[in-house]
Image (cartoon, rainbow, N blue to C red):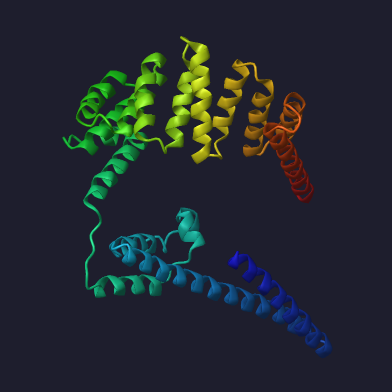
């Protein structure tokens, strides 16, 4: 918001300077003077914006240091992050991280944080469990993105084995993945992420019924995870046995998932399927409309919202939500048409 206000203020300031400067140049009868005024004004506006941006980043750095110190956490991690970004300064803009392009980094910022680290009287340490969490996150990412590299790690630690299990899963080697994962679950039976991985492996290899138990346990031990609930709901929908009971449970899990992950179009899609199987056309159409809205498909959202309105009881929460979606989708459709005209 502050950046937008600054740009607007600069635009007004620039306009005033251009008008006054151009008037003076015209009075002097000099085209070259007019061009010089335009160039100088543009440079002044850019300088004002960059000054404001640097002030914002400095304030953010100071706030970050303060938050870490109040939480009794080390500032050294912030310094390490900045030093990594500083290493990108000489790279072409296309090769720089998005953060680097939108958050200008100066040596003054790095020096400030480095000074704080050097002057800290109390050298705070991160909680011991964070090291294991960090190792597992790295192992998981390596296993997913670079499975061959993950398999080179022959370590016996939890993170190393977790990474290898994921790597085998990514290489469609289900039995090898489960052979590593099952002992991890035996040692840590309440770890929701080990259970989720096992469930996902079983589900994606067509063993849907077998995936339900580990998914249910994963949800039990990580009730706050909307993504795990959504995956469990999906598995329940795909299960063949006891369909009616499982469809009802799928609706419950998917609705709970939306409480923490409200912007997941796939969850709305699965809810549409679940309600459709239950014969609740109005709610099915409503969630298809939600899906279309989130995917920026206004025409689809409008169609489904109208059908939902027609099928749902008048004045019901669902019908009122369908009206809201219809209004939002129409506005989005209008914006898209205006952009297309501009192009």
In terms of image quadrants, where is residue 184?
top left
In depth, the one of 27 and 63 nearer the eye is 63
In terms of image quadrants, where is residue 232?
top left
In the picture shown, does residue 61 fall above or below 268? below
Q: Residue at x 44, y 67 (%)?
A: 105
In depth, the one of 235 and 253 nearer the eye is 253
Q: Is residue 151 among the parts visible in the rendering? A: no
In terms of image quadrants, where is residue 116?
bottom left
Q: Quadrant of the N terminus?
A: bottom right
Q: Residue at x 51, y 29 (%)?
A: 254
In percent of width and height, residue 41 lies at 67, 79
In percent of width and height, residue 87 lies at 36, 61
Q: Residue furthest bottom?
A: 28
**Left or right: where 276 falls relative to 165:** right
In percent of width and height, residue 231 lies at 45, 28
Q: Is residue 237 among the parts visible in the rendering? A: yes
In the picture shown, does residue 217 fall above or below 42? above
The number of callouts visible is 0
In percent of width and height, residue 250 lies at 50, 23
Q: Residue at x 39, y 75 (%)?
A: 108
Q: Residue furthest top?
A: 241
In the picture shown, does residue 278 fall above or below 76? above
Q: Residue at x 22, y 69 (%)?
A: 122
In depth, the one of 291 and 52 nearer the eye is 291
């Amino acid at each position: 918001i502050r950046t937008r206000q600054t740009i607007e203020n600069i635009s007004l300031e620039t306009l005033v300077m251009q008008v006054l400067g151009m008037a003076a140049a015209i009075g002097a009868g000099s085209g070259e003077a007019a061009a010089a005024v335009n160039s100088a004004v543009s440079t002044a506006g850019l300088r004002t914006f960059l000054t404001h941006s640097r002030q914002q980043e400095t304030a953010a750095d100071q706030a970050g240091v303060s938050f870490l110190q109040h939480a009794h956490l080390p500032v050294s991690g912030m310094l390490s992050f900045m030093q990594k970004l500083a290493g990108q300064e000489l790279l072409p803009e296309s090769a720089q991280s998005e953060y680097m392009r939108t958050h200008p980094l100066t040596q003054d910022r790095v020096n400030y944080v480095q000074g704080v680290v050097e002057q800290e009287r109390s050298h705070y340490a991160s909680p011991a469990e964070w090291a294991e969490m960090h190792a597992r996150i790295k192992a998981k990412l390596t296993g997913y993105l670079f499975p061959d590299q993950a398999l080179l790690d022959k370590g016996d630690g939890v993170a190393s084995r977790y990474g290898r299990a994921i790597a085998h899963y990514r290489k469609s080697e289900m039995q090898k993945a489960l052979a590593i994962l099952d002992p991890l679950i035996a040692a840590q039976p309440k770890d929701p992420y080990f259970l989720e991985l096992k469930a996902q492996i079983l589900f994606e290899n067509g063993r849907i019924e077998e995936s339900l138990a580990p998914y249910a346990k994963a949800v039990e031990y990580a009730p706050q995870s909307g993504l795990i609930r959504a995956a469990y709901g999906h598995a329940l929908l795909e299960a063949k046995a006891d369909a009616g009971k499982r469809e009802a449970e799928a609706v419950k899990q998917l609705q709970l998932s939306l409480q923490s992950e409200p912007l997941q179009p796939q969850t709305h899609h699965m809810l549409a399927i679940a309600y459709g199987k239950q014969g609740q056309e109005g709610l099915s159409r409503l969630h298809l409309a939600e899906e279309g809205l989130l995917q920026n498909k206004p025409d689809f959202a409008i169609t489904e919202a109208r059908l939902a309105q027609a099928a749902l009881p008048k004045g019901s929460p669902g019908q009122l939500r369908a009206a809201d979606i219809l209004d939002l989708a129409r506005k989005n459709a209008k914006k898209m048409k205006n952009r297309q005209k501009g192009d």
